[in-house]
């Protein structure tokens, strides 16, 4: 009877092993902190970009460039396959050119800068891989979008009413795909590609 009972338990144990629910998966490090950077192109815009302000003054901008995008984030692993987090982005853009005043036709040197801040909530799906040090994931994010624009005429800060007219959405969205790998204890490297900016970023991450 004891032998028959033991034999009857073996298929049951095998079935429980195969059908282990995802909630039973133990994650040793549920917290993940990231620091990343996306390189900018100092002079990427060829030709001139023409803008106007509310007074019909004309701006002819060239030599546009960016210092890149910096990001800092936190992510919490909810299960084997899903995580949620929050990421903040900062980017800087500048352009040099001239301003032609509509009323007097006076031409002056102009420098136009944009400091952009975004805070996004991330929803991430993680693929199942055999290597515990490797994460391959994709997801989407939505959040705020805030820009602080500045205009300098002959290197003197202008009033905000003189700024060129631009359209800025109050929200930001992003879709992304990335990989991260732990190289030493809980410290790792990651690379991420996305739509909605930045297009590609890399950096370090730390699991806790």
Image (cartoon, rainbow, N blue to C red):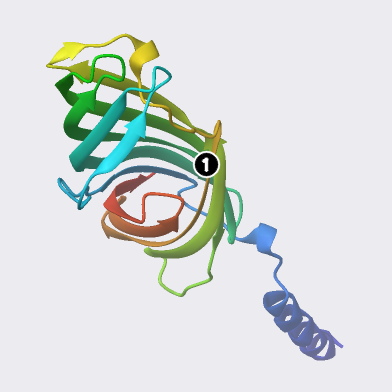
Q: Quadrant of residue 182?
A: bottom left
- Please give the name of the residue rendered at 51% of the width and 38% of the height, measured from the top-left corner: 120
Above or below: residue 134 compared with residue 156: below
- Horizontal relation, residue 142 to residue 17: left or right: left
Give the image location of residue 163, x and y in percent.
Answer: 35, 20
Q: Quadrant of residue 59?
A: top left
Give the image location of residue 54, x and y in percent.
Answer: 43, 19
Q: Give the labeled residue for mark 1.
A: 85
- Please give the name of the residue rendered at 45% of the width and 75% of the height, measured from the top-left corner: 130
Nearest the viewer among 147 and 46 is 46
Nearest the viewer among 179 and 170 is 170
Taking the image as drawn, is residue 69 in sight? no
Above or below: residue 2 compared with residue 36: below
Q: Residues within 10 Å of mark 1 (few under 14, many from 20)?
A: some
Q: Secondary structure at mark 1?
A: strand
Q: Residue furthest front?
A: 104
- Please give the name of the residue rendered at 17% of the width and 32% of the height, measured from the top-left corner: 97
């Amino acid at each position: 009877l004891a032998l028959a009972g033991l034999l009857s338990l073996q298929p049951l144990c095998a079935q429980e092993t195969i059908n282990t629910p995802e909630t039973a998966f133990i994650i040793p490090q549920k917290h993940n902190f990231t620091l990343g950077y996306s390189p900018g192109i100092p002079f990427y815009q060829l030709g001139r970009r023409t803008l106007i302000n509310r007074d019909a003054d004309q701006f002819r901008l060239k030599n546009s460039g960016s210092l890149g995008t910096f990001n800092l984030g936190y992510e919490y692993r909810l299960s084997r396959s899903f995580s949620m987090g929050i990421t903040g982005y900062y980017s800087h853009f500048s352009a040099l050119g001239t301003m032609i005043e509509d009323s007097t036709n006076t031409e002056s040197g102009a420098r136009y800068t944009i400091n952009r801040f975004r805070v996004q909530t991330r929803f991430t799906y993680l693929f199942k891989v055999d290597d515990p040090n490797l994460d391959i994931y994709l997801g989407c994010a939505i959040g705020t979008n805030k820009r602080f624009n500045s205009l300098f005429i002959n290197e003197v800060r202008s009033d905000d009413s003189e700024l060129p007219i631009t359209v800025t959405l109050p929200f930001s969205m992003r879709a992304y795909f990335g990989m991260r790998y732990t190289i030493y204890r809980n410290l790792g490297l990651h690379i991420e590609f996305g739509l909605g900016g930045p297009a590609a970023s890399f950096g370090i991450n730390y699991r806790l």
